[in-house]
């Protein structure tokens, strides 16, 4: 799918461009999260992934509403960064034969995505604030907060369960 180049001459243009990228990236993530949830062996990880799926679904709806309200031209836009994160995670997951190690890989991959999104949504909130767009500040700030909540849950899960199990997987006597 070819991309149509858009000239970015104002902060508003940049925010609009980023919003289209967010929408595309969130849709990619929304589509892969159910598969990743199925690959997880930890019940707690599955629960966090379900909660994340719900957050991402709401992000898609809110960003699409923002795009519509702002009359942003819906040009063909992909999100190469999110696609690269997902492709990298899929490659690593495909190489993990142990379920506990796969959970650690999945968790770490999702945290990489979280950190990217925390930064992106924080920047969009700052742009919106600079433009005096209070409603959009709230939208992007709320998305940033959701990402931080998932990141915190994943960090706790990694520290107190997932990484310990991956470090010492159960070995069956041969």
Image (spheres, helix red, strand yellow):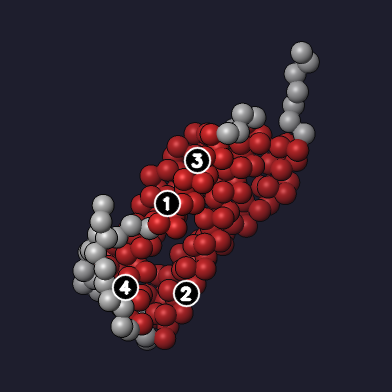
The earlier-in-sequence mark between 4 and 1 is 4
For label 3, the crowd category at 10 Å Cα-Cα, with few meaning under 14, some 14 to 19 and many 20 or more, is: some
Q: Label 1 belongs to which residue?
A: 83
Q: Nearer the viewer, residue 70 or 55?
A: 70
Mark 4 touching mark 1, by CB under 8 A?
Answer: no
Q: Label 3 belongs to which residue?
A: 90
Q: What's the CA distance linking mark 1 and mark 2?
A: 20 Å
Q: What's the CA distance linking mark 4 and mark 1?
A: 20 Å
Helix, strand or loop at mark 2 = helix
Identify the residue shown where x is 52% and y is 68%.
119
Residue 135 appears in the figure: no
The earlier-in-sequence mark between 1 and 3 is 1
Q: What's the CA distance linking mark 3 and mark 2?
A: 28 Å
Q: Give residue 69's quadrant in the image.
A: bottom left
Helix, strand or loop at mark 3 = helix
Q: What's the mark number on residue 16?
A: 4
Counting from the top left corner in percent of width and height, residue 144 is at 50, 66
Q: What's the CA distance linking mark 2 and mark 4?
A: 13 Å
| Image-based side of 10 in relation to 98, left or right | left
Q: What's the mark number on residue 65?
A: none
Q: What's the CA distance linking mark 1 and mark 3?
A: 10 Å
Helix, strand or loop at mark 1 = helix
The earlier-in-sequence mark between 1 and 2 is 1
Identify the residue shown where x is 36% and y is 52%.
27
Counting from the top left corner in percent of width and height, residue 106 is at 57, 43
Identify the residue shown where x is 26% and y is 52%.
1
Q: Label 2 belongs to which residue?
A: 123
Q: Give residue 21's quadrant in the image.
A: bottom left
Above or below, 124 against 165 in this view is below
Identify the residue shown where x is 74% and y is 26%.
170
For label 1, the crowd category at 10 Å Cα-Cα, with few meaning under 14, some 14 to 19 and many 20 or more, is: some
């Amino acid at each position: 799918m070819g991309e149509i180049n858009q000239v970015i001459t104002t902060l508003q243009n940049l925010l609009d461009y980023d919003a289209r990228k967010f929408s595309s990236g969130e849709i990619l993530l929304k589509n892969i999260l159910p598969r990743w949830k199925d690959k997880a062996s930890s019940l707690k990880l599955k629960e966090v992934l379900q909660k994340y799926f719900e957050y991402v679904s709401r992000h898609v709806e809110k960003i699409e509403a923002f795009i519509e309200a702002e009359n942003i031209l819906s040009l063909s836009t992909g999100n190469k960064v999110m696609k690269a994160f997902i492709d990298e995670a899929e490659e690593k997951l495909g190489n993990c034969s142990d379920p506990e190690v796969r959970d650690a890989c999945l968790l770490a991959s999702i945290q990489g995505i979280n950190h990217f999104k925390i930064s992106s949504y924080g920047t969009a909130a700052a742009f919106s604030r600079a433009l005096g767009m209070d409603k959009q500040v709230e939208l992007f700030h709320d998305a940033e907060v959701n990402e931080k909540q998932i990141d915190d849950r994943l960090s706790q899960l990694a520290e107190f369960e997932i990484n310990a199990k991956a470090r010492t997987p159960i070995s069956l006597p041969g």
